[in-house]
Amino acid sequence: MDCYNRKTMTSNKILHLTLLKKWFDLIASGKKTKEYRKIKPYWNKRLVGKKFDEIYFKNGYSKNAPFMRVEFKSIKKEKENYVIYLGKVLEKKNF
């Protein structure tokens, strides 16, 4: 029998982003409440028409890299950027 049970899994839509330490620390402290991404085909595909509940930020690519879950508020286009509005930090690990 398959131990994978879809009903027990969360239905949250997650946006995964990797950040440099400077920006990661500013978001973790609550000083940075917006994240920017250039309007390019890569980000169009990942962001346009999608709805998210949370953002998972990592500082680096290692298995034990600092990690945080942040509330997702909205995405707007401003000039040549997507602006991702961040809510409160929900969880921090490996700080």
Image (spheres, grey):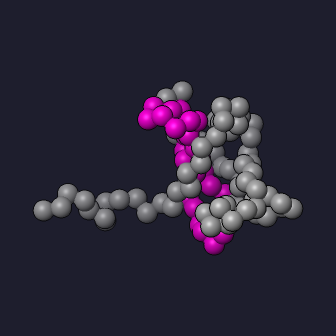
| The one of 8 and 66 positioned closer to us in this rendering | 66
Residue 46, picture quadrant: bottom right
The residue that appears at 31% across and 64% down in the rendered structure is: 6
Question: Above or below — where is 25 with respect to 4?
Answer: above
Which image quarter holds the C terminus?
A: top right
Which residue is outermost to the right?
A: 79
Which residue is outermost to the left?
A: 1
Give the mark count: 0
Which residue is outermost to the bottom?
A: 49
Residue 23 position, x and y percent, is: 70, 37
Give the side of residue 72 with respect to residue 26, left or right: left
Residue 74 position, x and y percent, is: 69, 61
Asked if residue 93 can be seen in this view, the reply is no
The residue that appears at 40% across and 59% down in the rendered structure is: 10
Question: Above or below — where is 6 with respect to 32?
Answer: below
Which image quarter holds the N terminus?
A: bottom left
The residue that appears at 59% across and 67% down in the rendered structure is: 51
Please state the extent of the stretch shown in magenta in the rendering: 47-73
Residue 68, picture quadrant: top right
Asked if residue 16 can be seen in this view, the reply is yes
Residue 79 counted in the magenta span: no
| The one of 13 and 65 positioned closer to us in this rendering | 65
Residue 56 counted in the magenta span: yes
